[in-house]
Image (cartoon, grey):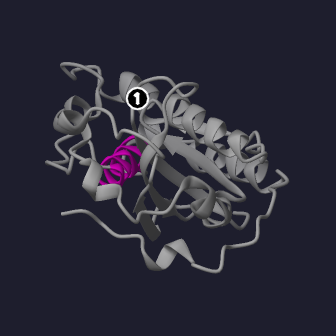
């Protein structure tokens, strides 16, 4: 398989609209071509205003004091996502928020291929009571997770991807070739580069308890 892999992403935001609201937390789980975990990253993000629905994402205004702005995180995020297939649960939503945040700093996000674990679950977990992330995880018997945290949701989406694209069943025939095709498409995309700020945000990124 070509170099690269998958970037499983999740964002928590100040609201539902990528055009009117801002990212307040981001989580990324990097997987290799055979879906093994390579690296994880998460950070709170200062949205430059109210954090929005604390009752959902449990991020208080005080939590983002001193957190990096998206502009500070952007160079590192580009390095993490470059050359990889984008994955998420309802990935078009997470992608839309990332595209708007990058657009605000004048950096277009590359049109990489993507995989939606919600769509995969609709095919592979027809017995699920719903297709939200928690219901899909329960139907797959994958246990609990830190719901509505960016890294917790990204880890859960990565687990769902492995469940739906694993190799044990006869239905898995042809999946390695399909994955390789997606990886080639992702590797062929040109990705912009941004210089990292002097104060490297990776040093201040953290996993919330």
Residue 196, position as x, y percentages in the image? 69, 73
User: Secondary structure under badge 1?
Assistant: helix
Residue drawn at the location 52% of the way across and 44% of the way down: 87
Classify mark 1: residues with Cα within 10 Å, few (<14), some (14-19) or many (20+): many
Q: Establish if 1 lies above or below 176.
A: below
Taking the magenta stretch, the answer to whether it contains residue 154 is yes
Residue drawn at the location 67% of the way across and 59% of the way down: 78
Q: Establish if 86 lies above or below 5.
A: above
Residue 58 vs residue 79: left or right? Answer: left
Residue drawn at the location 20% of the way across and 47% of the way down: 142
> Relative to the observer, which residue lies in front, 10 or 164?
10
Residue designated by label 1: 118
Q: Establish if 136 lies above or below 147.
A: above
> Relative to the observer, which residue lies in front, 97 or 5?
97
Taking the magenta stretch, the answer to whether it contains residue 53 is no
Q: Please tell me in which quadrant of the rendered image residue 12 appears.
A: top left
Can you say which quadrant of the picture contains the C terminus?
Answer: bottom left
Residue drawn at the location 64% of the way across and 43% of the way down: 178
Range of magenta residues:
150-166
């Amino acid at each position: 398989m070509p170099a690269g892999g998958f970037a499983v992403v999740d964002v928590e935001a100040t609201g539902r609209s990528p055009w009117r609201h801002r990212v307040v937390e981001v989580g990324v789980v990097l997987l290799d071509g055979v879906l093994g975990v390579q690296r994880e990253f998460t950070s709170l993000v200062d949205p430059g205003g109210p954090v929005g629905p604390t009752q959902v994402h449990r991020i208080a205004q005080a939590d983002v004091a001193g957190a990096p702005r998206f502009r500070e995180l952007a160079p590192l995020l580009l390095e993490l996502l470059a050359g990889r297939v984008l994955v998420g649960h309802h990935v078009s939503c997470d992608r839309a928020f990332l595209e708007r945040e990058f657009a605000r700093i004048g950096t277009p996000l590359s049109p990489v291929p993507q995989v939606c674990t919600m769509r995969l679950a609709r095919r592979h977990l027809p017995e699920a009571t719903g297709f939200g992330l928690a219901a899909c995880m329960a139907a797959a018997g994958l246990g609990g997770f830190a719901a509505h945290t960016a890294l917790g949701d990204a880890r859960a989406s990565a687990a769902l991807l492995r469940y739906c694209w694993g190799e044990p069943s006869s239905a898995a025939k042809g999946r390695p070739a399909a994955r390789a095709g997606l990886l080639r498409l992702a590797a062929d995309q040109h990705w912009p580069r941004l210089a990292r700020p002097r104060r490297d945000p990776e040093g201040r990124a953290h996993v919330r308890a």
